[in-house]
Image (tube, rainbow, N blue to C red):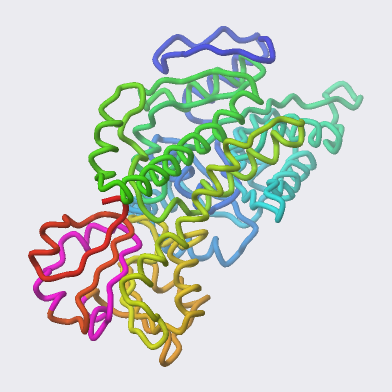
Amino acid sequence: MPAEVNTLQSPTSDLPLVGEADVELMERVRSKQAKIAVLGMGHVGLPTALSLAEMGWKVLGADNAIAQVERLRARYVPFYEPGLSELLDKHLGNNFIPVDDLEAAIREATILFICVGTPQRENGEADLSQVESVAHTIALNLNAYKLIVEKSTVPAVTAEWVKRTILRYAKAVPNGNGSAGEIAFDVASNPEFLQEGIAVRNLFYPDRVVCGVESDRAKAILQEIYRPLNAPVLITGLSTAEIIKHAANSFLAMKISFVNMVADLCEVVGADVTQVAAGLGMDARISPGFLKAGIGFGGYCFPKDLRAFIHLAEEFGLNFSLLREVEAINQQRVEVFLKKVRKALWVLRGKTLAVFGLAFKPGTDDTREAPSMKIIERLLAEGASLRLHDPRAIPILKQSLPEKEGSIKYCEDPYEAAKQAHAVLLLTEWPEYRALDLTQLRSMMEVPVVVDGRNIFDPAQMREAGFEYISVGR
């Protein structure tokens, strides 16, 4: 098979023919006798492992962090993701075994999914030290054929470095005739497209499955793994698959920054960005997804992947100034929102502000790179007293941002947070906030100001309920 292949395969199509030496391997794969080890039990690894277990595979969930593994053994999911706890309860001890010995898991499994972290450096470059470390560990424990699947989001040519690392450090083993021989392995790229809050749904009902491969053997195994999903499978080369992930996230980030740019224009000319977005989204070439104006995108993936994509391109001397501007527009959204708050309240020092929503999006407890965190930091610096509410993120956030008398208080429900507040600032579009009793909310507040950073309320309804209502682009 050539290095770069671009074909759309139906997951129900016949498997490609393989060599005689692979017949036994493929029989073990088809019968699910080949074990899978998922290396890394974070936001990507744990959902991946449990989805594979649900599909009938025997999965080792491996992580060097003993405390993380112990929590899983105790049926505790260390982060909130709808549906994940139910899958853990169902498969723990059966199809899913958490282990803290990566080396043993590598030796025992045939298929290895690399799901370790790839945090960004200060210059935006992806830090691939964990990927290299895992590749080195795989090399030292290569005792039989392995399909090594790169699942973590990584820049192009990372798979080539994984392969090179394994070739460099793999130990020679007896080949059966008394001499040293090499063990066959394949490296594949199978990027994840998980959205926190709906990750389980993404895994079982994906828009597409992208598989970057270099051999028919790797292609056959991956097609067999994803056969039950009945989703389109795009077969490509390694670097192509890696670029697809970064390009997809960067394009979606661009849509968000674009609609936020348009929202600012809508405000000054008296237009409604929600209707503009609806008109844009009705165009089949554009689609309505990711056209919601607000305080910008956050989370672990979009900002990190955007910067890594820019850094990769600029390393090769390419002009990615378009994406530089996407990032700049997104960073400006915090100041745009703060200006709205200042305009409504004048001086923020001494004001009590109820903050609704801390997670970067609904359905998760993740506050990494959340716009809310930057807004909170700025509000505290200006002397405001904050009463914080979020349906899921409070327990985790308390560890890094503890309560402080006179400045930070966490509240059990939004009405408590709004008590004697001079304004409600809505930063995450949790459905719980849409269902609030507006009359009760108004009665709790000192001043009936709502600054809605996600446009979840109807302006006419809010005015009728007695609020001074400020939103984005309307």
Please check the rendered image and state whether residue 420 is part of the magenta-colored stretch, yes or no: yes
Comparing 204 with 462, the one in front is 462
Between 389 and 191, the one lying in front of the other is 389
Residue 289 locus on image (x, y percent): 33, 36
Above or below — where is 247 with respect to 336?
above
- Residue placed at 57% from the left, 67% from the top? 67
Q: Which one is in front, 88 or 401?
A: 401
Question: Is residue 212 at all visible to an observer of this figure?
Answer: yes
Q: Is residue 301 shown left or right of residue 3? A: left
The answer, for residue 95, to whether it is visible in the render is: no
Work out which residue is located at the far bottom of the displayed protein and give it: 405
Compared with 241, 436 (above or below) is below
Image location of residue 139, percent across then percent down: 78, 39
The stretch of residues the image draws in magenta is: 415-442
Please determine whether, in this image, residue 7 is positioned above or below residue 299.
above
Tell me if 465 is positioned left or right of 312 in this view: left
Please state which of residues 441 and 269 is positioned toward the viewer in this rendering: 269
Left of 407 or right of it: where is 331?
A: right
Q: Residue 53 vs residue 381: left or right? A: left
Tell me the quadrant of the picture where the N terminus can be found: top right
Q: Residue at x 66, y 26 (%)?
A: 239
- In the image, residue 329 lies at what x, y percent? 50, 48
Q: Is 67 within the magenta?
A: no
What is the quadrant of residue 66 in the picture? bottom right
Q: Is residue 77 above or below residue 410?
A: above
Percent position of residue 291, x then y: 34, 40
Among the 4 quarters of the image, the one containing residue 324: top right
